[in-house]
Amino acid sequence: MEKIIKAPKATKIEKKLEIHGDVRIDNYYWLNDKENLNVIDYLHEENDYYNHVTAHTTKFQSALYEEMKARIKEDDESVPYKKNNYHYITKFQLGKQYPIYTRKKETLEAQEEILFDVNQMAKKHSYFKLSGLSVSPDNKLVSFGIDTKGNREYKLQFKNLESGKLFSEKIHNTTGGSTWANDNKTIFYTKNNPITLRSEKIFKHVLGTNVSEDVEVFFEEDERFNTFVYKTKSEKYIVIGSYSTVSTEYRFLDANNPNGEFKILQPRERNLEYSIAHYDSDFYILTNKDEATNFKLMKTSEDKTEKEHWVDVLPHRKDVLLEDISIFKNFLVVEERENGLSKIRIIKWDKTEDFYLPFEEETYSAGVYYNPEFDTDIVRYGYNSMTTPSSVIDFNVVSKTKHIVKEHEVLGGKFDKKNYKSERLWATAQDGTKVAISLVHHINTEFSENTPLLLYGYGSYGHTIDPSFSSTRLSLLDRGFIFAIAHVRGSEYLGRNWYEDGKLLNKMNTFTDFIDCAQFLEDNKITSAKHLYAYGGSAGGLLMGAVINIKPELFNGIIAAVPFVDVVTTMLDDSIPLTTGEYDEWGNPNEKEYYNYMKSYSPYDNVTKQNYPNMLVTTGLYDSQVQYFEPAKWVAKLRELKTDKNILIMHINMDAGHSGASGRFDSLKEVARDYSFIIDLEGRTII
């Protein structure tokens, strides 16, 4: 007889949390301590319960995984890019989880040189990530970072590409990236705070010397800021950047003089944001200076860099968000966003031409690719939509011709883009604001109250979720699901104001927008509450937690991945990674106004005695961005208070962090796990 496993019931240990004269009782605060064996035992109980509840879908999950895997070209490789006389290519081999990094000198017909076979490096690890590959100017050395836990603490190492040997020095607790000075021996890198993991210090290391002798060249003292280092595309300057939610600052140093002093380009000011690119004898500056909410492009001489010397190149436009620029010898490439859609603009320096690349679909995603070459007529960009697989395209600015260098292959013989349809709808929010919904479905799927629909949302940090292609998503579409993205406030989908209207004391708009999009889909009989599902991860998991407290009856099921749900307690704990640096995103709860507002929507604080949808919650034990105990506490409290008999399960990856599994196939298993949850709720798990 099969053993019946009951849902875990976490022990209640009262913890009083008091501030501003307000007392919150947290009965599951004890779950914060992963050194406590009782905590680990509880997490294992949750995994056992998950396995028990989903046991009947095990074969279906495996079939779904194989179905998704079969669409992937396993023996694949990236489009080569050329830098400093070498062509760099990333390859995948049949059956292998990790990439192989290679290069060829001068021509693509040259002998292949393997830089790293990550499959070999990852053999003894359950999680492995190689990051931050940086080749020295003379092409003989490479620096790289390794993370074996998923907690974003990279060990920086160095390799001689001629001999294949590793240097003895290893630098711990870095961000993984590094930047070479032009002397081929001096490296600048970023170190994290050992407790909060804030990237706070820039060090200088001379290859072959003891790491203990490394020189600290910059310390970002303001806990609201993070720092990073890079080299300009012109190769002339080493640049140190500092950034917070509402302010930036850059300092620069001649890359030929690594022992010199960095010079501040423009001192930081609150609400002044800018980023820089170097060309000829000028710095080009993307900035919100002079109340340019959607940003504008300015420039200044490298000898006179303070803001009073900046002059306009591209003026601010109320309805167009200026997102990024790429500088080439003969032209400037500008990435813009208008009415939610990406646009790529090309402007010749001699002002003889100024034009946009043509895109024809109603909703799509496009962006400039990595273009390390400076003296070229070719702009490489990427394009895809919810029905069109991603393509890498080379556009010749002179001849106006484009060449599709690589189109993502969907194997299996069943995919035809003509069988799918995408469109954009507009819901009306409670305050009258129009909110876009991008959706895709199989042409044979009819809209009705019986049509299952998965609604995705994020809505924080100004991060825009573009309507893009996914081969794994076909497993939903081919089973009659609609997939939709709610472009809620908190992103920059409709410009910078769209972000401002979904942060701080406007954060509630993010949640009500999502609810209004869900209501719109149901009111228009595109789906119904019995068949509507929602998915969000990280800050999108906060979105999931908030909307099911407010309107749980709108959804049949929810997937909350690594969800940020214990907002108040986390934002009051400045020892937790990301806390102090995010006061300008969420507010500082040490101030009563922000505390009260935050408490009004924090999912954990607002769990109440009511019915909740079916729920799958996922997390990783080594997550340093949203730590495992947030979803663990949330699930425990939901189990205590919810009044329904719907499914509530949590899966904890005991070997990974915020991004989940590191191998490309293991990550597919996570998608199969999530999809099988909602497909099972629809009763469509027949293999």
Image (cartoon, rainbow, N blue to C red):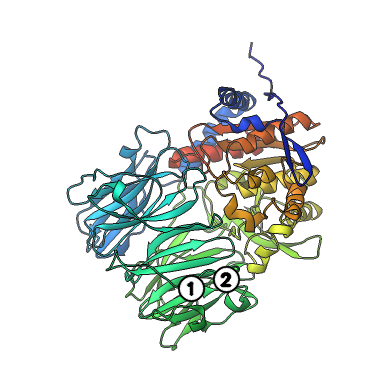
Which percent across, then down, holds residue 354? Answer: 48, 83
Identify the image quadrant of the N terminus: top right
Q: Residue furthest top?
A: 1
Residue 223's disc number? none
321 above or below 213? below
SS at mark 2 in the image = loop
The answer to which image quadrant residue 677 occupies is: top right
The crowd level at tag 2 (other Cα within 10 Å; few <14, some 14-19, many 20+) is: some
Q: Nearer the viewer, residue 383 or 260?
A: 260
The residue where tag 1 is placed is 266
Q: Residues within 10 Å of mark 1 (few under 14, many from 20)?
A: some
* Horizontal side of residue 106 vs 59, given as left or right: left
Q: Mark 1 is on which residue type?
A: Gln
- How far apart, in angstroms, are the residues tagged by discs 1 and 2? 10 Å
Q: From the image, which quarter does the C terminus lie in? A: top right
For numbered disc 1, what is the local secondary structure?
loop
* Residue 2 drawn above or below residue 236: above
Picture coordinates of residue 332, whole percent (x, y): 43, 78
**Relative side of 501 to 301, left or right:** right
655 in relation to 443, above or below: above
Task: Please state if 393 lies on the left or on the right of 675 as rendered.
Answer: left
Which residue bears the numbered disc 2?
272
What amino acid type is highlighted by mark number 2? Leu
Instruction: Check contact, mark 1 vs mark 2: CB within 8 A.
Output: yes
Residue visible at 35% across and 32% down? 124
Residue 164 is situated, as x and y percent measured from the top left of the image, at 20, 46
Q: Quadrant of residue 625?
A: top right
